[in-house]
Amino acid sequence: MPGIHPDIISHKLSIFRDARPVAQKKRRLGSEKRQAVDEEVQKLLDAGFIREVKYTTWLANVVLVKKSNDTDALSRQRKNRFHYRTRLPFGLKNAGATYQRLMDKVFENQIGRCMEVYVDDMVRRSHSLEDHVKDLEEVLGQVRKYGMRLNPAKCTFGVNAGRFLWFMLTDRGIEANPDKCKAILEMRNPNSLKEIQRLVGRLTSLSRFIPKLAEKIKPILKLMRKNTPEGWNDECEEAFKGVKEILNVQPVMGRPDPGHALHIFLAVTDTAINAALIQEEPQFKLVYFVSRSLKETEVRYQKLEKVALSLLYVARRLRPYFQGYQVIVRTDYPIAKILRKPDLAGRMIGWSVELSEFGLQYEPRGLVKGQHLAEFVVELPYTILTHAWKLYVDGSTCKAGGGARIVLVGPNDMIVEQSIIFKFKASNNQAEYEALIAGMELARDVGADNLACYTDSQVVEGHMNGSYQVKDDYLLRYFHKAKQLQTRFGEFTITHVPREQNTRADRLSKLANGKEKGVLNSVIRQVLSKPIVGCYAISSPTSSNKQICWKDEIIRLIRRQDEGHNLQVEETKKISRYCLIGEDLYRRGYVTPMMKCLSMEEASYVLRELHHGICGRHTGGRALKARVLRAGFFWPTLEHDCLSFLQKCISCQKHDNVFHAPASELHNIFSPWPFAQWGMDIVGSFPLGQSQKKFLLVAVDYFTKWVEAEPLAIISTAQVKRFIWRLICRFGLPKTIITDNGRQFIDKRLQSFYKELGITSITSSVEHPQTNGQAEAANKIIVNELKKRLGEAKGGWVDEIDHVLWGYRCSPHGSTGESPFNLTYGTDAVLPVEVGEPTVRRQLSDMTINNEQLRSNLDVIDERRHVPAIKNEAYKRLVARRGSSLA
């Protein structure tokens, strides 16, 4: 616009100035079109949007476009006398984005409060006439201030309804555009693929007003598939008529009132997922209908997975609503208790983590209001039968351990499957009891009250029904646990079935323990490292003098929620990232997916082991905290406890670094790839140790920060050469080795060795030893760690050096954010602390999955190394700037 100053907004074009201008052949227009062109061009000249140019080398003919009001408009504002544009045309790339930024800047104080703007569409909204007049004065004042110009023919004031973004905004709410509805109602039956695509596109634009659209037009969608021989048939005609009936009486979508919860109803079929978003208070409002057809792979999902997928899809589609309101999911499916289980398998665990950020609440479906919502849920009957839940269990054993499989069948043919892998040796009867107890717990988790259990074990069935006496002491513990769970059901029966009638559970139990290979996947997958009765025997005892732990309140709230009690909003948010595995509390984290929650006594043990233990390292507070999180542990006062623990460490206080180096300009050295550049140095002499060793030859990789060190009695060129050859055999041929000017490093024989292998040798100058600063920094860390570990027993440094190196390699480095071990092997090492306090990856370990994950980690290790490389370079530049600023 001519009135907008370039300092306010401007659009720059990157033009290739040597390009040859395009000169089209001049086209003549008829008298009517020529008159329309003259009128439009004169309007643009009067408004100052264009100006005349002479002696141009280009020509673009005018193209007239018929508008909705039967008037002609120019799609190119040029006349045959060649006019040059001084305004921003919408034909340019990113022109709309530039114009939107202008609108956002001009009306930044009005947008969201009393005004909505989308490019050149502006809507001013008010609750009363007095407010409308005041707000109009404010908006028009901004228009005058920035010199904008409005088209009076397109401006409307003081109306109760209007169009905005192809919707009708009225005092009742948001309605579909009548013109779009009319286009569908008057549309004849499609005869070609293009017409079918046009029809589906028009219906999709109105999908928020049509409940279960994907399901209703399923016959029409089939026609869009490739190689479909059938054309428009009776099913398509019935579907088209059904949609037209809905458009004749379309629902009105309301704007939700802040501070009141939103409710979601889910509807799932074999080929589509649907959802309805409503608000019941302070008055009933339909907010949004969401519908989508299932992909070919999604059609094979279990029904429970489809329900979870529908919830995930609507959360992604309506994310602003989920973030701004408390959302309550109204469904009779036990999706809440399933999603809260930490041992979900495959995609379900990812969906659970993604949905956990919204703090969703779950309630039974109950009664529904409104005609359209009633039609939405009418096809989802959920009849409670006497034995609505059936449980099929089976266990099997092998030399490596065993497995169990649970198939839980509920109303509406809902199936929940769980597989269990035993990491302990068990008898066949133990495996059957493990399957039975796990199945009963799963049934209670999903809310089953009446349960009919089927097993192919006559022993277990005889024990539970009293036909057989339990003589084995170990099976007696299983029997008492099963009987204890039986009391939690209103009605419970167990029946023996032949193995041939329990084929699915039998086959899936064999898949769990590895006897067979197949494609049957379970929703829940669990790994037991010890018998379930052992777990309960260890974790069930209580003591009257037990200290109060921070975990107790969270565990209590989780159990109350599992029992069906309604929690406060604050309580729901408090436990949203926690879950129970057996009797242990876990927290969903960002560093590791599941972190075990520790009491204060357990936390103290972990800190001691990571700081003083076998692979411990006397690091700073942030590094110690990072190691705790990477190991998979959490407690609320983690950061404070790490700092407090270091302040009480006498070794850290005695031998911590004191910096005396003067400020000077710093230059960083960057390694382009792992193990391409090594820094080497000699540390010593140390007190005489084992085999009269008193020197330490150290090498550090500039990228991964991996450190190798070898104690030596004497330093010679032959030993340096042998040490370098070992590095080459383990990590490959390096490009550069940086050393100081020691005679062992500049020997002619070693230089000849470098030349044969194509290795570049760089030596630091006497005036600037910081060239080999990476090796110097590693030396300082090793010496300080030895001091803190040995104290006065300095002669044992040879035996202690491996522990120091292990601790260094397993600790995250400040410049990369990753440990050298992770950058080298693509995963974190298992630390001894995980033996004393088992973590998730030890308790739920699966060698098959572990091997696959290790291989996949190696496939993406280059991508993982790219991010630490960027962090490393940024860290070096930050240090260089700070050092230079002090110079």
Image: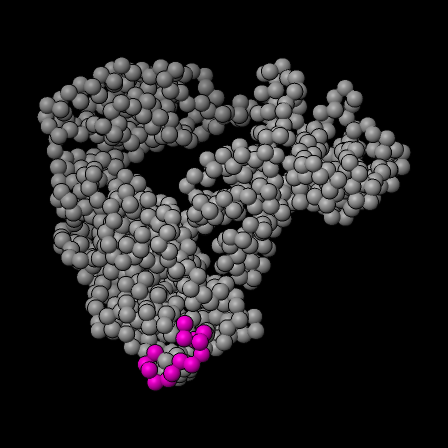
Q: Nearer the viewer, residue 553 or 104?
A: 553
Q: Nearer the viewer, residue 576 or 88?
A: 576
Residue farthest to the front, as pictured: 545
State whether residue 876 is above or below residue 52: below
Left or right of residue 245, residue 625 in this image = right
Q: Residue at x 64, y 30 (%)?
A: 655
- How many labels were placed on the picture? 0
State whether residue 516 is above or below residue 631: below
Residue farthest to the right, as pictured: 748
Residue farthest to the left, as pictured: 129
Left or right of residue 679, residue 378 in this image = left
Q: Quadrant of the N terminus?
A: top left
| Residue 167 seen | yes
Queried whether the magenta region covers residue 470, the answer comes back as yes
Residue 372, image x and y in percent? Answer: 16, 54
Q: Residue at x 40, y 57 (%)?
A: 583
Residue 688, image x and y in percent? Answer: 80, 38
Quarter of the image for residue 704 reads top right
Left or right of residue 519, residue 671 in this image = right
Magenta span covers which residues? 464-477
Queried whether the magenta region covers residue 795, the answer comes back as no
Q: Quadrant of the C terminus?
A: top right
The colour scheme is: one colour
Left or right of residue 735, residue 217 in this image = left
State whether residue 261 is above or below residue 491: above
Residue 801, image x and y in percent? Answer: 71, 42
| Residue 518 seen | no
Q: Residue at x 35, y 65 (%)?
A: 442
Residue 38, image x and y in percent? Answer: 29, 23
Quarter of the image for residue 394 reads bottom left
Q: Nearer the viewer, residue 192 or 485?
A: 485
Q: Residue at x 51, y 52 (%)?
A: 837
